[in-house]
Amino acid sequence: MKKLLLSLSLLWAMNSYAQEAPVQDSVKAWSIVGQNTLMLNQSAFSNWVAGGANNIGWQAGVNYNLTYEKDKDLWENVIILGYGMNNTQGVGNRKTQDVINLSTNYGRKLSGDWYTSVGAGLISQFAPGYADGNNPDAAKISNFMSPGYVNVGAGFTYKPSDNFTMTLRPANARFTFVMDKDLQWAGNYGLKNDGDSMLFQFGFLGTAQYKVKLMENITLQNAASVFSNYLDHPERLVMSYSGILNMKVNKYISTNVTLDLLYDHNQIRKTQLKQTLGIGFAYNIDNGKKRSDDKRNQSWK
Protein backbone atom coordinates (compact mmCIF):
# COMPACT_ATOMS: atom_id res chain seq x y z
CA MET A 1 0.00 0.00 0.00
CA LYS A 2 2.84 2.37 0.88
CA LYS A 3 4.50 1.68 -2.50
CA LEU A 4 1.22 2.45 -4.30
CA LEU A 5 0.79 5.74 -2.45
CA LEU A 6 4.42 6.67 -3.18
CA SER A 7 3.97 5.96 -6.89
CA LEU A 8 0.77 8.02 -7.03
CA SER A 9 2.52 10.90 -5.27
CA LEU A 10 5.38 10.87 -7.76
CA LEU A 11 2.99 10.81 -10.74
CA TRP A 12 1.01 13.72 -9.28
CA ALA A 13 4.18 15.78 -8.72
CA MET A 14 5.43 15.15 -12.26
CA ASN A 15 2.06 16.11 -13.74
CA SER A 16 1.96 19.32 -11.67
CA TYR A 17 5.47 20.28 -12.84
CA ALA A 18 4.56 19.64 -16.47
CA GLN A 19 1.55 21.92 -16.19
CA GLU A 20 3.51 24.71 -14.50
CA ALA A 21 6.63 24.50 -16.69
CA PRO A 22 6.92 27.41 -19.11
CA VAL A 23 6.09 26.70 -22.74
CA GLN A 24 9.17 26.95 -24.91
CA ASP A 25 9.16 29.43 -27.79
CA SER A 26 8.77 27.20 -30.83
CA VAL A 27 8.76 30.04 -33.36
CA LYS A 28 11.93 30.03 -35.42
CA ALA A 29 14.31 32.98 -35.28
CA TRP A 30 14.89 32.73 -39.04
CA SER A 31 12.26 33.87 -41.51
CA ILE A 32 12.38 33.55 -45.29
CA VAL A 33 10.10 35.59 -47.53
CA GLY A 34 10.56 35.63 -51.28
CA GLN A 35 9.13 35.72 -54.76
CA ASN A 36 10.13 33.91 -57.95
CA THR A 37 8.83 35.42 -61.19
CA LEU A 38 8.77 34.52 -64.88
CA MET A 39 7.29 37.15 -67.20
CA LEU A 40 6.56 36.39 -70.88
CA ASN A 41 5.62 38.56 -73.88
CA GLN A 42 5.05 37.77 -77.55
CA SER A 43 3.83 39.48 -80.74
CA ALA A 44 3.12 37.93 -84.16
CA PHE A 45 2.20 39.60 -87.49
CA SER A 46 0.98 38.25 -90.83
CA ASN A 47 -0.05 40.52 -93.71
CA TRP A 48 -0.49 43.32 -91.16
CA VAL A 49 -0.61 46.57 -93.16
CA ALA A 50 0.40 48.74 -90.20
CA GLY A 51 3.60 46.75 -89.98
CA GLY A 52 5.42 45.08 -87.15
CA ALA A 53 8.09 42.51 -86.38
CA ASN A 54 7.50 39.13 -84.74
CA ASN A 55 9.09 39.01 -81.32
CA ILE A 56 9.16 36.96 -78.16
CA GLY A 57 10.67 37.82 -74.80
CA TRP A 58 11.02 36.73 -71.20
CA GLN A 59 12.17 38.05 -67.85
CA ALA A 60 13.02 35.93 -64.82
CA GLY A 61 13.84 37.07 -61.32
CA VAL A 62 14.06 36.23 -57.63
CA ASN A 63 13.53 38.59 -54.70
CA TYR A 64 14.28 37.15 -51.25
CA ASN A 65 14.57 38.49 -47.73
CA LEU A 66 16.18 36.24 -45.12
CA THR A 67 15.78 37.66 -41.61
CA TYR A 68 17.15 36.57 -38.25
CA GLU A 69 15.35 38.16 -35.31
CA LYS A 70 16.07 37.26 -31.71
CA ASP A 71 16.08 39.38 -28.56
CA LYS A 72 17.86 42.62 -29.54
CA ASP A 73 19.45 41.21 -32.69
CA LEU A 74 18.14 41.91 -36.19
CA TRP A 75 19.96 40.58 -39.25
CA GLU A 76 18.38 41.10 -42.65
CA ASN A 77 19.72 39.74 -45.96
CA VAL A 78 18.33 40.67 -49.37
CA ILE A 79 18.87 38.78 -52.64
CA ILE A 80 17.60 40.38 -55.85
CA LEU A 81 18.53 38.77 -59.18
CA GLY A 82 16.94 39.40 -62.55
CA TYR A 83 17.61 38.74 -66.22
CA GLY A 84 15.58 39.03 -69.41
CA MET A 85 15.92 38.71 -73.18
CA ASN A 86 13.86 39.68 -76.23
CA ASN A 87 14.20 38.22 -79.72
CA THR A 88 12.86 40.39 -82.55
CA GLN A 89 12.71 39.21 -86.16
CA GLY A 90 15.43 40.90 -88.18
CA VAL A 91 17.13 42.32 -85.11
CA GLY A 92 18.10 39.32 -82.98
CA ASN A 93 18.46 38.93 -79.24
CA ARG A 94 18.53 41.98 -76.99
CA LYS A 95 18.87 42.18 -73.22
CA THR A 96 15.87 43.72 -71.44
CA GLN A 97 16.71 43.13 -67.77
CA ASP A 98 19.99 42.54 -65.96
CA VAL A 99 20.51 43.08 -62.24
CA ILE A 100 22.49 41.67 -59.32
CA ASN A 101 21.69 43.28 -55.96
CA LEU A 102 22.85 41.60 -52.74
CA SER A 103 22.91 43.19 -49.30
CA THR A 104 23.22 42.32 -45.62
CA ASN A 105 22.62 44.49 -42.55
CA TYR A 106 23.04 43.55 -38.90
CA GLY A 107 21.52 45.69 -36.17
CA ARG A 108 21.64 45.67 -32.38
CA LYS A 109 18.74 47.47 -30.73
CA LEU A 110 19.85 50.75 -29.21
CA SER A 111 16.62 52.36 -28.03
CA GLY A 112 13.03 52.18 -29.19
CA ASP A 113 13.02 51.80 -32.97
CA TRP A 114 16.73 52.60 -33.40
CA TYR A 115 19.51 50.06 -34.00
CA THR A 116 23.25 50.45 -34.30
CA SER A 117 24.10 48.64 -37.49
CA VAL A 118 26.80 47.49 -39.88
CA GLY A 119 26.25 46.25 -43.39
CA ALA A 120 27.52 45.57 -46.88
CA GLY A 121 26.08 45.44 -50.36
CA LEU A 122 26.94 44.49 -53.95
CA ILE A 123 25.35 45.83 -57.15
CA SER A 124 26.34 44.65 -60.63
CA GLN A 125 25.03 42.81 -63.72
CA PHE A 126 25.41 39.42 -65.43
CA ALA A 127 26.16 40.20 -69.09
CA PRO A 128 27.71 42.92 -71.29
CA GLY A 129 25.80 46.07 -72.16
CA TYR A 130 26.24 48.03 -75.40
CA ALA A 131 25.75 51.66 -76.41
CA ASP A 132 23.15 50.99 -79.12
CA GLY A 133 20.35 49.19 -77.30
CA ASN A 134 22.50 46.16 -76.40
CA ASN A 135 23.55 45.67 -80.02
CA PRO A 136 26.72 43.52 -79.79
CA ASP A 137 28.09 45.30 -82.89
CA ALA A 138 28.07 48.61 -81.01
CA ALA A 139 30.55 49.83 -78.40
CA LYS A 140 30.59 47.89 -75.14
CA ILE A 141 29.82 50.13 -72.15
CA SER A 142 29.41 47.66 -69.25
CA ASN A 143 29.90 44.06 -68.19
CA PHE A 144 29.87 41.79 -65.14
CA MET A 145 31.58 43.70 -62.29
CA SER A 146 32.22 46.51 -64.76
CA PRO A 147 30.99 48.39 -62.98
CA GLY A 148 30.46 46.53 -59.74
CA TYR A 149 29.67 48.55 -56.63
CA VAL A 150 30.54 47.31 -53.15
CA ASN A 151 29.44 49.30 -50.08
CA VAL A 152 30.67 48.55 -46.55
CA GLY A 153 29.75 50.79 -43.64
CA ALA A 154 28.47 51.41 -40.13
CA GLY A 155 25.75 53.63 -38.75
CA PHE A 156 22.18 53.47 -37.53
CA THR A 157 18.96 51.81 -38.67
CA TYR A 158 15.50 53.22 -37.89
CA LYS A 159 12.47 50.96 -38.20
CA PRO A 160 9.31 52.52 -36.71
CA SER A 161 6.87 50.20 -38.51
CA ASP A 162 6.64 47.05 -40.58
CA ASN A 163 6.63 49.01 -43.82
CA PHE A 164 9.38 51.60 -43.32
CA THR A 165 13.12 51.17 -42.81
CA MET A 166 15.82 53.83 -42.98
CA THR A 167 19.57 53.25 -42.62
CA LEU A 168 22.07 56.08 -42.16
CA ARG A 169 25.79 55.32 -42.50
CA PRO A 170 28.03 58.34 -41.83
CA ALA A 171 31.02 56.03 -42.33
CA ASN A 172 30.70 54.13 -45.61
CA ALA A 173 33.40 52.84 -47.98
CA ARG A 174 32.29 52.57 -51.61
CA PHE A 175 34.37 50.53 -54.06
CA THR A 176 33.74 50.79 -57.81
CA PHE A 177 35.22 47.81 -59.67
CA VAL A 178 35.86 47.74 -63.43
CA MET A 179 37.21 44.25 -64.13
CA ASP A 180 36.72 44.31 -67.93
CA LYS A 181 40.05 45.45 -69.39
CA ASP A 182 38.29 46.99 -72.41
CA LEU A 183 36.60 49.48 -70.07
CA GLN A 184 39.60 50.39 -67.91
CA TRP A 185 40.37 53.85 -69.22
CA ALA A 186 40.65 57.13 -67.35
CA GLY A 187 37.32 58.82 -66.65
CA ASN A 188 35.23 55.71 -67.21
CA TYR A 189 33.17 55.14 -64.03
CA GLY A 190 35.45 57.62 -62.26
CA LEU A 191 38.72 55.73 -62.80
CA LYS A 192 41.76 57.97 -62.29
CA ASN A 193 44.17 56.30 -64.74
CA ASP A 194 44.12 53.99 -67.75
CA GLY A 195 44.37 50.39 -66.57
CA ASP A 196 42.89 51.04 -63.12
CA SER A 197 40.41 48.40 -62.01
CA MET A 198 39.05 50.03 -58.85
CA LEU A 199 37.97 53.42 -57.50
CA PHE A 200 37.77 54.00 -53.75
CA GLN A 201 35.37 56.49 -52.19
CA PHE A 202 34.49 57.19 -48.57
CA GLY A 203 31.44 59.10 -47.44
CA PHE A 204 27.83 59.10 -46.26
CA LEU A 205 25.24 56.57 -47.43
CA GLY A 206 21.54 56.84 -46.69
CA THR A 207 18.92 54.30 -47.76
CA ALA A 208 15.19 54.00 -47.21
CA GLN A 209 12.49 51.44 -48.07
CA TYR A 210 8.77 52.13 -47.90
CA LYS A 211 6.06 49.60 -48.71
CA VAL A 212 2.41 50.49 -49.07
CA LYS A 213 -0.73 48.51 -49.86
CA LEU A 214 -2.73 50.63 -52.32
CA MET A 215 -5.72 48.29 -52.37
CA GLU A 216 -6.52 44.59 -52.22
CA ASN A 217 -3.85 42.65 -54.16
CA ILE A 218 -2.06 45.87 -55.28
CA THR A 219 1.14 46.91 -53.51
CA LEU A 220 3.87 49.47 -54.17
CA GLN A 221 7.43 48.98 -52.94
CA ASN A 222 9.74 52.01 -52.94
CA ALA A 223 13.50 52.10 -52.35
CA ALA A 224 15.81 55.13 -52.48
CA SER A 225 19.45 55.84 -51.70
CA VAL A 226 21.90 58.74 -51.69
CA PHE A 227 25.69 58.72 -51.41
CA SER A 228 28.09 61.64 -50.88
CA ASN A 229 31.85 61.18 -51.25
CA TYR A 230 33.75 63.08 -48.53
CA LEU A 231 37.05 62.77 -50.40
CA ASP A 232 36.18 64.42 -53.71
CA HIS A 233 33.28 66.72 -54.71
CA PRO A 234 30.84 65.81 -51.91
CA GLU A 235 28.18 67.91 -53.69
CA ARG A 236 28.04 65.37 -56.54
CA LEU A 237 25.46 63.08 -55.02
CA VAL A 238 24.82 59.58 -56.32
CA MET A 239 21.04 59.17 -56.12
CA SER A 240 18.77 56.28 -57.03
CA TYR A 241 15.10 55.34 -56.79
CA SER A 242 13.36 52.05 -57.50
CA GLY A 243 9.61 51.44 -57.51
CA ILE A 244 7.81 48.12 -58.00
CA LEU A 245 4.04 48.06 -58.50
CA ASN A 246 2.73 44.53 -58.03
CA MET A 247 -0.82 43.69 -59.10
CA LYS A 248 -1.72 40.16 -58.06
CA VAL A 249 -4.26 38.35 -60.25
CA ASN A 250 -4.29 35.10 -58.28
CA LYS A 251 -1.90 32.87 -56.36
CA TYR A 252 0.36 32.24 -59.36
CA ILE A 253 -0.26 35.07 -61.85
CA SER A 254 0.66 38.72 -61.34
CA THR A 255 1.54 41.92 -63.19
CA ASN A 256 4.64 43.94 -62.30
CA VAL A 257 5.47 47.50 -63.31
CA THR A 258 8.95 48.72 -62.39
CA LEU A 259 10.55 52.16 -62.54
CA ASP A 260 14.24 52.83 -61.89
CA LEU A 261 15.91 56.26 -61.77
CA LEU A 262 19.64 56.79 -61.28
CA TYR A 263 22.02 59.74 -61.33
CA ASP A 264 25.74 59.04 -61.02
CA HIS A 265 28.18 61.71 -62.20
CA ASN A 266 30.85 59.04 -62.79
CA GLN A 267 28.63 57.05 -65.15
CA ILE A 268 26.88 59.70 -67.27
CA ARG A 269 25.97 63.28 -66.48
CA LYS A 270 22.31 62.67 -67.16
CA THR A 271 19.46 61.04 -65.25
CA GLN A 272 19.09 57.38 -66.22
CA LEU A 273 15.61 55.84 -66.48
CA LYS A 274 14.43 52.26 -66.90
CA GLN A 275 10.79 51.08 -66.98
CA THR A 276 9.41 47.58 -67.46
CA LEU A 277 5.97 45.98 -67.61
CA GLY A 278 5.45 42.25 -67.31
CA ILE A 279 2.61 39.76 -66.92
CA GLY A 280 3.41 36.23 -65.92
CA PHE A 281 3.93 33.67 -63.20
CA ALA A 282 4.90 34.42 -59.62
CA TYR A 283 5.56 31.90 -56.86
CA ASN A 284 5.77 33.26 -53.32
CA ILE A 285 7.56 31.69 -50.36
CA ASP A 286 6.86 32.48 -46.71
CA ASN A 287 8.08 30.02 -44.09
CA GLY A 288 5.58 31.28 -41.53
CA LYS A 289 5.80 33.26 -38.31
CA LYS A 290 8.71 35.12 -36.82
CA ARG A 291 9.36 35.47 -33.13
CA SER A 292 7.20 38.57 -33.12
CA ASP A 293 4.18 39.77 -35.06
CA ASP A 294 6.46 42.07 -37.05
CA LYS A 295 5.80 40.80 -40.56
CA ARG A 296 8.34 42.56 -42.74
CA ASN A 297 8.04 42.49 -46.53
CA GLN A 298 4.27 42.06 -46.49
CA SER A 299 4.14 43.46 -49.99
CA TRP A 300 5.97 40.38 -51.30
CA LYS A 301 3.10 38.05 -50.46
Image: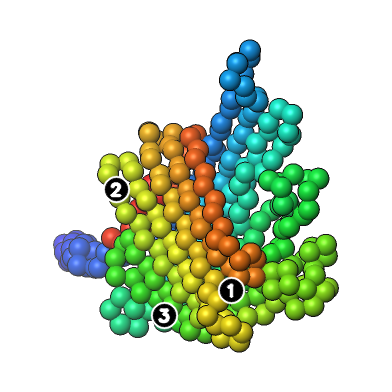
Tell which residue pokes out farthest to the bottom in this image: 231
Q: Is the residue marked by circle 2 packed among few (<14), some (14-19), or many (20+) residues within 10 Å?
A: few
Residue 17 vertical position relative to residue 215 in the rendered view, above or below:
below
Q: Is the residue marked by circle 1 packed among few (<14), some (14-19), or many (20+) residues within 10 Å?
A: some
> Residue at the location (39% across, 71% down)?
166
Confirm or deny contact between disc 1 and disc 2 (CB under 8 A): no
Confirm or deny contact between disc 2 and disc 3 (CB under 8 A): no
Under circle 3, the secondary element is strand
Count of numbered circles in the view: 3
**Residue 178, percent from left and from top:** 74, 67
Q: Amino acid at mark 2?
A: Leu
**Residue 202, percent from left and from top:** 59, 83
Q: Which of these two is toward me, 192 or 10?
A: 192
Under circle 1, the secondary element is strand
Q: Amino acid at mark 1?
A: Asn
**Residue 227, percent from left and from top:** 52, 75
**Residue identifier under label 2:** 214
**Residue identifier under label 1:** 151
Confirm or deny contact between disc 3 and disc 1 (CB under 8 A): no
Is residue 68 visible in the rendered structure shown here? no
> Residue at the location (36% across, 61% down)?
210
Q: Amino acid at mark 3?
A: Phe
Residue 38 vertical position relative to residue 202 in the rendered view, above or below:
above
**Residue identifier under label 3:** 156
How far is mark 2 from mark 3, CA to CA?
Answer: 29 Å
How far is mark 1 from mark 2, CA to CA?
Answer: 32 Å
Residue 281 vertical position relative to residue 240 in the rendered view, above or below:
above
Q: Which of these two is toward me, 56 or 17?
A: 56
> Residue at the location (68% across, 33% down)?
87
> Residue at the location (35% across, 48% down)?
219
Under circle 2, the secondary element is strand
Q: Earlier in the sequence, mark 2 or mark 3?
A: 3
